[in-house]
Amino acid sequence: MQHIILIRHGRAEAGSWNMDDFDRPLTPEGTEWISRAAALLLQGSRSVATAKRVRIIHSNALRTTQTAEEIAAVLSRAGIAGELENDPELYQADQDHLLKLILSAETGVTMVVGHNPAIGQCAESLSGSPLAMHPGSVVVFSLDTADSESLVGKNHEPELVIHPH
């Protein structure tokens, strides 16, 4: 069984004419929420709380990198190794790229920290129903990734959904 956690990066600074979208950092509130969401994830997901290591794949945009690093820090304080993996393709990825990451994931816990629309489309494809992925949203799925035909459109019930308040 594979535990897949889809996370949209935390709330980021608004873009401006002199700041590239790629370089937008998390706001202080965005960082605070991600820390809180990671703690809620530890409380609400047995698969995460009992893991020895968690693979955290993120895009190389600043806000997703900061989100992944904050989650890894919270996991570390709980004695769980958060193994960060930068995937430059996630910045402009489509849903198919995310599904390939899920299918290639090892048994255990894999987090994918990414951007809309792909992260939201992937969550909806797996659950079979609309799932709003606001900045800082987290969705946990337990999937049998050995059967790739059963991944999309099979109404996988999320184990846990966390939305920012």
Image: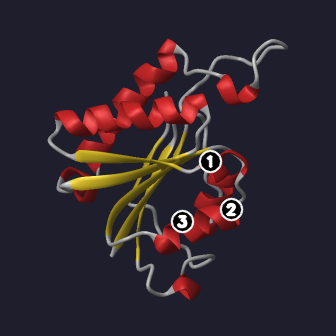
Q: Residues within 10 Å of mark 3 (few under 14, many from 20)?
A: some
Please state which of the two labelled residues, at mark 1 or mark 3, is closer to the viewer. Answer: 1
Circle 2: element type = helix
Please state which of the two labelled residues, at mark 2 or mark 1, is closer to the viewer. Answer: 1
Report the residue marked by disc 1. 88
The amino acid sitting under disc 2 is Gln
Residue 140, by quadrant, is bottom left
The amino acid sitting under disc 3 is Leu
The amino acid sitting under disc 1 is Pro
Asked if marks 1 and 3 touch (Cβ < 8 Å), the reply is: no
Query: In the visual, does 106 lie left or right of 125?
Result: left
Q: Residues within 10 Å of mark 2 (few under 14, many from 20)?
A: some
Residue 74, relative to residue 90: is it above or below? above
Please state which of the two labelled residues, at mark 3 or mark 2, is closer to the viewer. Answer: 3
Q: Residue at x 62, y 61 (%)?
A: 122
46 or 87, which is in the foreground? 87
Asked if marks 3 and 2 touch (Cβ < 8 Å), the reply is: no
Residue 12, relative to residue 79: is it above or below? above
Q: What whole-number distance in Å separates the C-alpha atoms at marks 3 and 2? A: 10 Å
Q: Earlier in the sequence, mark 1 or mark 3?
A: 1
Q: Residue 106 location, x and y as percent?
A: 37, 71
43 or 13, which is in the foreground? 13
Q: Earlier in the sequence, mark 3 or mark 2?
A: 2
Q: Residue 52 location, x and y as percent?
A: 18, 55
Extreme residue toward the right, this view: 17
Report the residue marked by disc 2. 95
Which coloring applies here? secondary structure
Residue 132, relative to residue 134: is it above or below? below
Report the residue marked by disc 3. 101
Query: In the visual, does 91 lie left or right of 154?
Result: right
Query: In the visual, does 141 lie left or right of 40?
Result: right
The numbered disc on residue 146 is none
